[in-house]
């Protein structure tokens, strides 16, 4: 075994004028570092990079020396992303690309694509080679076209070059622009033709490249769908490969189909149900195969697709995922176990499970039946923030179910760890924990009362001052939900601790439309059905500021969601308090704005405006004796108090015209009719 | 077909000359470049002879990625080298090698630590005690063979070839099938796979 001093000498030997010594040193270094992270680290410390890259940069360096130097680069790149970054910064990629140019020595070409493949294993490096893509792609294509000549007989070196070139091409597909650049070279047909070639490494490389090319790209997925191979379509060929015994082939084929499914290309649901999902379940149970990749693939496939989520449930995916959690839990204190891998696995399982249960009620029930909540609650106390955040995300989707919220959640013990996570130092954890909280505070949730007793309002008040706007948004949303159907004592506590001033200030948060929306939503619920709430708002902020806020919410350029909340805020004030309704009506601009929104193209906005008009119009003039005792001038009793102001806006005619519109939304039509009831009938 | 089965066996097990001859005589074209077998066999022989360092160098010349991307295989080769050092009585060198090479690898891959512990246990006992212990199998030629087979399978897979020959698996299947049928029926069976003769069972 060489000593450190000897390693130093090997590095110095790289500068020798004797090529034999240089070659020998390179070979020794190569054999020392391959497989050994410690040796790689040692050679980085000995600053090997400039020595090796300078050998490649010289035009007259011997081919054999180049091959060994390139192999050293390749092995160093395997160390980690930081190592690859240092290599990239040294400018070695340019030299490697020159070495794969057409006409270069075959062995050198193979070593160079190998090195490029190793370097491009990291996301940052894939993005960092942008300036080289233009030159790399045609060189890679010229290597790949060798496949036409070698398809019948296996020639080891040729196949290795082709396989590596395809892998590098796939790894370059990091951006949409690059996907199109590469797809436009016509490589798709070449890659597709390799699918039935029968050489697994080539098939896997082709599948990976096709998967990368078509990832999140509807156009390329569509182009692939139309590709015809000798006796079958592209989709048929891929489905055959999904059934392949080789797990790598099966997995990568499933990814290709998943891409098309995600882009809604082709009618693949039945094939996904009968071939892809069962293939992935089989891979989950395959001993020695990376279950983490399979779990992530399942999550990707099931994303936002209720039918596939259901197929996954029917294929037993949920139970398999829970089984994985159970096995990992049993290994927590075990020796000889890769705990780091297990942690990534747990995170992956929760994210995938969350995806599967995100829209499908049956899936949620199945997950709860399989004791998912037990694992989720335990995971909320995990030391790793990623696991905590993933557990919160999964929980959030499970508790979208009203019945689960009412039955299983209260006994799950979820509240205590969740409240702790709300106060976690890490933003990611707070974001997912606060998002989970939103669903637990609806008026039908039994945990609401317990949460209030546990000091939830104080926690929410702190979250409102978070620098993270998503945390703040989620806190506002929680407050909004909390205010629905609560008693005045709780409402008073919330108002005192959250502060109306804070809600007002967030309602006008610059450049943060979603904060404005949710703050307005919270204010809307502060005043709903409650004079306490209305008085608190007006007493704290004053009439002028309340009106200014309502005006701002109803500006023509405001987002629909903000307009809706603004209109319902006005409505909730108007319907409950005649005095404060009068303040709203007294602002001509505001009233005109409310009236103008009844014809808004968004039916949600229109309905909100119509409710508001309805509430304003609902205030009647009192009886004659009441008017006289109040000192008011006598008006016709029973008539809408604000009929004059509403008529001045030509509102009745507008509403009648709306009724004549046969395409009017039914809910809007109902509201229009209710509003018209307050107006006198037209004289015939 | 039977010829393909035999060719498959000869290629995977590395009988290059036999494969070439068989190809000539049977007229069966190999879908594999027979020249590639030679390098693989030299690597295999190196392991079987206990020359792990040479085997690793040859692997690195043939496929420099293999040992960087298969930590388990690399570990088993290093473990075999350690065993060879212990076998040769170079205990101090073995200890240094284990500390410098194997221990860091075990730290990165804790699932391999159990095997490392077993191997290190060889250093704790003298040879006379080891040969009577369950650790004796580590020093046996069989362990070299196991390592050689693992490396051979990895090289085959890296070059798109099956990891194992089909013929031994078929023979195993034959034996199992006959065992199952023996309980249920009387039929002409192959008792001797070398002769391959079908024999009626005695009633």
Image (spheres, coloured by chain):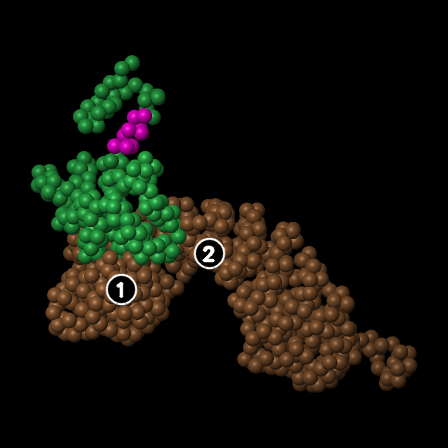
Chain colours: A brown, B green
Residue A664, picture quadrant: bottom right
User: The residue tagged with tag 2: helix, strand or loop?
Assistant: helix
Is A619 in front, or is A167?
A: A167
Report if residue A537 lies within the magenta region: no
Q: Residue at x 16, y 61 (%)?
A: A107
Q: Residue at x 59, y 56 (%)?
A: A399
Image location (x, y in percent) of residue A185: 25, 67
Work out how far the residue at label 2 is from the one at label 1, CA to CA, in angstroms: 36 Å
Image location (x, y in percent) of residue B101: 30, 56
> Mark 2 near mark 1, Cβ–Cβ under 8 Å?
no
Report if residue B178 lies within the magenta region: yes
Tell me if A551 is positioned left or right of A395 in this view. right
Residue B125, picture quadrant: top left
Question: In this picture, is A50 found above or below A352?
Answer: below
Parent chain of label 2: A
Magenta part mainly helix, strand or loop?
A: helix
Question: In this picture, is B93 found above or below A590?
Answer: above
Q: Residue at x 16, y 63 (%)?
A: A24
Is A654 in front, or is A65?
A: A65
Q: Residue A343 has which mark?
A: 2
Image location (x, y in percent) of residue A78: 30, 62
Question: In this picture, is B39 found above or below A37?
Answer: above
Question: In this picture, is B143 found above or below A353?
Answer: above
Residue B1, picture quadrant: top left
Marks counted in the figure total 2
Query: Residue tagged by mark 1?
Result: A4
Parent chain of label 1: A
Give the magenta-colored segment's residue range.
B171-179
């Amino acid at each position: 075994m060489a000593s450190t001093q000897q390693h130093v000498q090997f590095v110095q030997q790289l500068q020798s004028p004797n090529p034999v010594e240089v070659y020998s040193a390179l070979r020794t270094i190569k054999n020392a570092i391959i497989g050994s992270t410690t040796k790689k680290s040692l050679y980085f410390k000995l600053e090997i990079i400039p020595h090796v890259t300078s050998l490649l940069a010289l035009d007259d360096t011997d081919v054999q020396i180049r091959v060994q130097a390139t192999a050293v680069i390749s092995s160093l790149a395997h160390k980690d992303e930081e190592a690859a970054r240092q290599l990239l910064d040294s400018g070695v990629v340019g030299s490697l690309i020159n070495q794969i140019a057409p006409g270069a020595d075959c062995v050198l070409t193979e070593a160079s694509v190998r090195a490029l493949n190793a370097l491009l294993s990291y996301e940052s490096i894939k993005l960092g080679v942008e300036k080289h893509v233009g030159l790399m792609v045609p060189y890679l294509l010229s290597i790949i076209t060798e496949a036409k000549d070698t398809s019948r007989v296996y020639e080891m070196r040729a196949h290795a070059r082709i396989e590596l070139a395809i892998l590098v091409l796939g790894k370059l597909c990091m951006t949409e622009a690059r996907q199109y650049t590469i797809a436009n070279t016509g490589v798709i047909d070449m890659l597709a033709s390799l699918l039935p070639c029968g050489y697994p490494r080539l098939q896997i490389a082709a599948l990976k490249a096709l998967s990368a090319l078509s990832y999140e790209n509807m156009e390329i997925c569509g182009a692939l769908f139309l590709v015809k191979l000798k006796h079958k379509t592209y989709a048929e060929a891929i489905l055959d490969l999904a059934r392949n015994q080789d797990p790598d082939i099966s997995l990568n084929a499933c990814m290709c189909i998943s891409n098309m499914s995600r882009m809604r290309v082709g009618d693949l649901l039945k094939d996904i149900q009968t071939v892809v999902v069962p293939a992935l379940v089989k891979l989950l149970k395959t001993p020695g195969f990376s279950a983490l990749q399979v779990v992530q693939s399942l999550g990707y496939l099931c994303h936002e697709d209720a039918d596939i989520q259901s197929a996954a449930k029917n294929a037993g995916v949920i139970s398999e995922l829970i089984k994985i959690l159970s096995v990992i839990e049993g290994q927590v204190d075990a020796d000889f176990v890769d705990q780091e891998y297990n942690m990534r696995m747990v995170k992956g399982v929760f994210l995938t499970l969350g995806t599967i249960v995100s829209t499908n009620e049956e899936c949620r029930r199945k997950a709860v039946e399989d004791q998912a909540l037990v694992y989720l609650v335990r995971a909320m106390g995990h030391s790793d923030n990623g696991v905590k955040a993933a557990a919160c995300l999964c929980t959030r989707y499970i508790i979208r179910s009203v019945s689960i919220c009412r039955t299983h959640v209260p006994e799950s013990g979820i509240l205590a760890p969740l409240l702790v996570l709300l106060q976690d130092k890490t933003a990611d954890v707070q974001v997912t924990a606060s998002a989970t909280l939103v669903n637990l505070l609806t008026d039908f949730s039994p945990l609401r009362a317990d949460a209030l007793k546990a000091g939830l309002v104080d926690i929410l008040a702190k979250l409102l001052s978070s620098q993270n706007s998503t945390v703040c948004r989620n806190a506002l949303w929680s407050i909004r939900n909390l205010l629905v159907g609560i008693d005045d004592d709780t409402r008073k506590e919330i108002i005192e601790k959250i502060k109306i001033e804070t809600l007002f200030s967030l309602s006008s948060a610059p450049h943060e439309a979603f904060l404005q929306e949710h703050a307005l939503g919270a204010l809307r619920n502060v005043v709903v059905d409650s004079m306490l709430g209305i008085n608190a708002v007006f007493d704290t902020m004053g009439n002028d500021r309340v009106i200014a806020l309502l005006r701002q919410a109803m500006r023509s350029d405001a987002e629909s969601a903000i307009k809706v909340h603004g209109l319902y805020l006005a409505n909730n004030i108007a319907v409950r308090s005649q005095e404060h309704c009068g303040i709203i009506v007294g602002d001509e601009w505001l009233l005109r704005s409310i009236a103008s929104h009844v014809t808004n193209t968004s039916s949600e906005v229109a309905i909100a405006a119509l409710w508001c008009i309805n509430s304003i119009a609902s205030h009647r003039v009192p009886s004659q004796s009441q008017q006289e005792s109040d000192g008011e001038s006598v008006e016709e009793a029973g008539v809408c108090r604000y009929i004059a102001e509403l008529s001045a806006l030509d509102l009745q005619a507008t509403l009648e015209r709306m009724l004549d519109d046969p395409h009017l939304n039914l809910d809007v039509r109902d509201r229009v009719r209710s509003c018209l009831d307050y107006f006198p009938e037209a004289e015939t | 077909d039977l010829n393909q089965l035999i060719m498959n066996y000869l290629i995977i097990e590395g009988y290059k000359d036999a494969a070439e001859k068989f190809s000539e005589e049977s007229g069966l074209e190999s879908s594999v470049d027979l020249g590639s077998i030679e390098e693989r066999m030299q690597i295999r022989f190196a392991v079987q002879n206990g020359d792990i360092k040479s085997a690793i160098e040859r692997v690195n010349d043939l496929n420099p990625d293999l040992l960087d991307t298969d930590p388990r295989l690399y570990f088993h080769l290093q473990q075999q080298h350690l065993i060879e050092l212990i076998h040769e009585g170079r205990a101090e060198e073995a200890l240094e090698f284990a500390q410098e090479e194997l221990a860091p690898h075990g730290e990165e891959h804790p699932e391999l630590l159990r095997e490392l512990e077993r191997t290190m246990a060889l250093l704790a006992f003298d040879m006379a005690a080891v040969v009577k212990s369950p650790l004796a199998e580590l020093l046996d030629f069989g362990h070299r063979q196991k390592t050689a087979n693992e490396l051979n399978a990895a090289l085959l897979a890296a070059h798109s070839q099956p990891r194992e020959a089909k013929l031994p698996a078929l023979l195993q299947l034959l034996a199992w099938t006959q065992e199952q049928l023996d309980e249920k029926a009387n039929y002409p069976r192959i008792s001797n796979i070398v002769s391959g003769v079908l024999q009626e069972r005695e009633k």
